[in-house]
Amino acid sequence: MSLKVLVVDDASFVRMVICQMLIRLGHTDILEAKNGFEAIESYKTDMPALTLLDITMPELDGLSVLKEIIAFDPSAKVIMCSAVAQGQVVREALDLGASDFLTKPFRLDELEKIIANYLGTN
């Protein structure tokens, strides 16, 4: 079952890798955003079933984007993705409404488990 997924990361290579993983898992309705402003606009326009959101981005960081998305749609499924997995950052993201946290780089099976947990595709 293919669900609409929004991938937000300022690094094009990271977006490409995540998109390839999603395709391997059978998800072909994939949206991409290279910054926080694009992410908010895309979320409001396209209402993805799942958003994979980087924390560290220029212009508008992932935590600010998360706040905007949750304010717009409190039921949003947003998975924060970051190489910085400090406890304080993870706690703040979860307190702001993130569904979960993936530490980059993550494996295909970790992404598959997240999708199954939050979208009921298991």
Image (cartoon, rainbow, N blue to C red):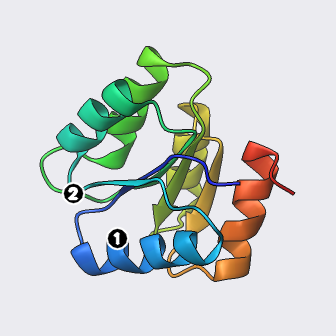
Percent position (x, y) of residue 49? Answer: 57, 39
Q: Outermost residue, left direction?
A: 59
Would you identify the image quadrant in which residue 114 lies?
Answer: bottom right
Percent position (x, y) of residue 79? Answer: 56, 50
Q: Nearer the viewer, residue 81 or 34?
A: 34
Percent position (x, y) of residue 6? Answer: 42, 49
Q: Are marks 2 and 1 in contact (CB under 8 Å)?
A: yes
Query: Mark 2 vs mark 1: which is more N-terminal?
Result: 1
**Residue 83 seen in this snapshot:** no
| Residue under the image location 20 percent in, 51 percent down | 35
- Name above or below for residue 110 compared with residue 27: below
Identify the residue under disc 1: 15
* Alpha carbon distance from label 2 to label 1: 8 Å
Position of the C terminus by quadrant: bottom right
Would you identify the image quadrant in which residue 38 lies?
Answer: top left
Q: Is residue 96 left or right of residue 39?
A: right
| Residue under the image location 45 percent in, 69 percent down | 84
Q: Amino acid at mark 2?
A: Lys
Position of the N terminus by quadrant: bottom right
Q: Outermost residue, right direction?
A: 122
Percent position (x, y) of residue 68? Answer: 36, 25
Within 10 Å of disc 2 (Cα), the crowding (few <14, some 14-19, many 20+) is some
Q: Which mark is residue 34?
A: 2
Label 2, secondary structure: give it: loop
Q: Amino acid at mark 1?
A: Arg
**Residue 100 seen in this snapshot:** yes
Q: Is residue 111 left or right of residue 76?
A: right
